[in-house]
Image (cartoon, rainbow, N blue to C red):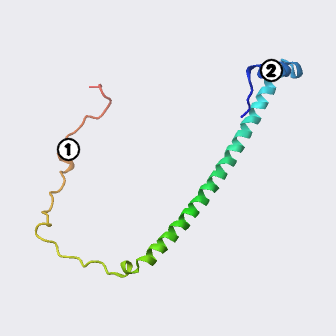
Amino acid sequence: MFDIGATELLVIVIVAVIVIGPKDLPLALRTAGRWMGKIRRVSGHFRTGVETMIREAEMEEMEKKWREQNAQIMAEHPADAAEPAEPATAPTAESRTEPKAPPPEADDQPKLPLGKPGSE
């Protein structure tokens, strides 16, 4: 964002010490840090809102495009939509399966010791 080198930072620190004074400098830096935090939060919130609006606009654009393509496909192939579905056929002997056995009861499960590991 800002291209501040070491020499520029040193000049800023020297000027701050001379103008503000060494006694009030920590309070001034703390206040400046709070302001920077507030500015970052507000700008982040603003950026998130703008990105959300852009995503929503893109989604509306894509949905419009999909609706147009769907209408075009439906116009090109009207017979496909009017054809009835194939009738269901009776299951053959090969497709039938035997009923499965019920799952084992809870009593058949192995019991695990309760408590902390290594407390035996």
Q: Label 1 belongs to which residue?
A: 109
Amino acid type at circle 1 is Gln
Q: Quadrant of the N terminus?
A: top right
Q: Is residue 94 left or right of residue 65?
A: left
Q: Nearer the viewer, residue 41 or 99?
A: 41
Residue 72: percent from left, percent from top: 48, 74
Amino acid type at circle 2 is Val
Q: Is residue 42 above or below residue 97?
A: above
Across the whole image, how many numbered discs are drawn on residues? 2
Query: What residue is shown at x 72% (from left), y 36% (from top)?
Result: 37
Residue 85: percent from left, percent from top: 30, 78
Residue 99: percent from left, percent from top: 14, 62
Q: Residue furthest front?
A: 76
The kind of secondary structure element at disc 2 is helix
Q: Label 2 belongs to which residue?
A: 13
- The mark closer to the camera, 1 or 2, is 2
Q: Which mark is residue 62?
A: none
Query: What residue is shown at x 41% (from left), y 80% (from top)?
Result: 78
Q: Quadrant of residue 96?
A: bottom left
Q: Quadrant of residue 73?
A: bottom left
